[in-house]
Image (tube, rainbow, N blue to C red):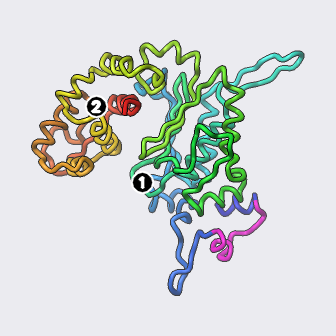
Amino acid sequence: MQAFYQLITHEEIDMVCLQKLKLIKQSNDSLKPTGAYFLFADEDIKSQFFPYAKVECARFKGTTLEETLDQKTFQGSIIQQTELAYDFILRHINKGSTIEGVYTKSKWEYPIIAIREVIRNAIVHRDYSLTGKDIKVAIYDDMVEITSPGKLMPSIDYDDRESGQSDVRNKVIAPIFKKLGIIDQWGNGLKLIDEELKLYKNEIEFLWRDTGTQFQVQFVKKQIKERVKETDTRSVVVKSSNDELIQLIGTKLALSWHQVGTKLAPSWKSLVDILETCIDGATIVTIMGKLNLKDRTKFRNKYIKALLELGIVTMSQPDKPNSPNQLYYTTEKGKLFLENIKYLL
């Protein structure tokens, strides 16, 4: 951070500068680092205080989560994370050429300026108070997907990108990113996204959703989407009717609306809450607390047993089902189901 800051601004980071940037503050008779200080620090220091403030990147084979071709975790300073995640995407997407008159012009298969802005927004505006959650960048044959912890700021409408909206969750991080030129003037990022998407209107469909716990953006290839619509159960089938989506889930995941209503009993919202809580592992007490339930035996028999049978939740210690240290995890099958079911709520 110190070297990069001096390179860009030609200013040295000293104690006065750190106070001006609000990376340290006066506390009683001494200066103390703020949370943002650790986020800008190198990996060893940052990870001690914000181990979940990282970016997980993966390139999957085909259009599902079943096979991973490449995977990287970026845990360093949030400045490094921004560029490393962007570089990861560029390594895994194609760049072609088109002939316009006597000129040959190169063009990426995805709108990379828009993708870059979404990554920067994810890092600058994510909710760093959500422990156990990280930014995820997923690349499939048919789309690039970026997911950030925390809901969209209430004053921002992603369907009105050209209006130049601006809102800041992290009021220390954002000004530093702006000073370093990583983000442009306030409100310009959404405009850049909108402008480039217009150049890809025949090739890429732009989708976004806000679940309350995370914000997700997808850049979907239109031609491939049409070919896989009948068999793919991921969220790219959001345009399909609810009946089609339920049928796809029932066929590919062996789970239907009827089974959820009778065998599992929880509502769709409760099922989503369980699967989201178990993404990074959770005890049965934690899961029950999420649903405001008290009877552990009833919860285990009515909810957990069925989820385990369906293969969308697994145990950390399957040979010791009643262990007090038992953790429940959402499986890849459960994550795939989770992506789809949110569109029905």
Q: Nearer the viewer, residue 99 or 303?
A: 303
Of the image marks 1 and 2, the number of the one nearer the N terminus: 1
Can you say whether 99 is above or below 238 in the image?
above
Q: Position of residue 306 (x, y in %)?
A: 18, 31
The answer to whether 8 appears left or right of 282 in the picture is right
Query: Does residue 80 appear in the picture of this structure?
Result: yes
Residue drawn 31% across the image and 22% down it? 253
Q: Residues within 10 Å of mark 1 (few under 14, many from 20)?
A: some
Q: Position of residue 32 (x, y in %)?
A: 53, 76
Stretch in magenta: 9-21
Q: Nearer the viewer, residue 218 or 311?
A: 218
Residue drawn 10% across the image and 44% down it? 297
Q: Quadrant of the N terminus?
A: bottom right
Q: Position of residue 121 (x, y in %)?
A: 59, 47
Q: Residues within 10 Å of mark 2 (few under 14, many from 20)?
A: many
Q: Quadrant of the C terminus?
A: top left
Query: Does residue 137 appear in the picture of this structure?
Result: no
Rounded to the nearest angstrom, the CA distance separating label 1 from label 2 is 23 Å
Residue 292 part of the magenta-drawn span: no
Residue flagged by tag 1: what amino acid is it? Leu
Q: Residue 246: give its label.
A: none
Q: Residue 312: give its label.
A: 2
| Residue matched to label 1 | 130
The answer to whether 211 appears left or right of 26 in the picture is left
Residue lying at the far left of the rendered structure: 297
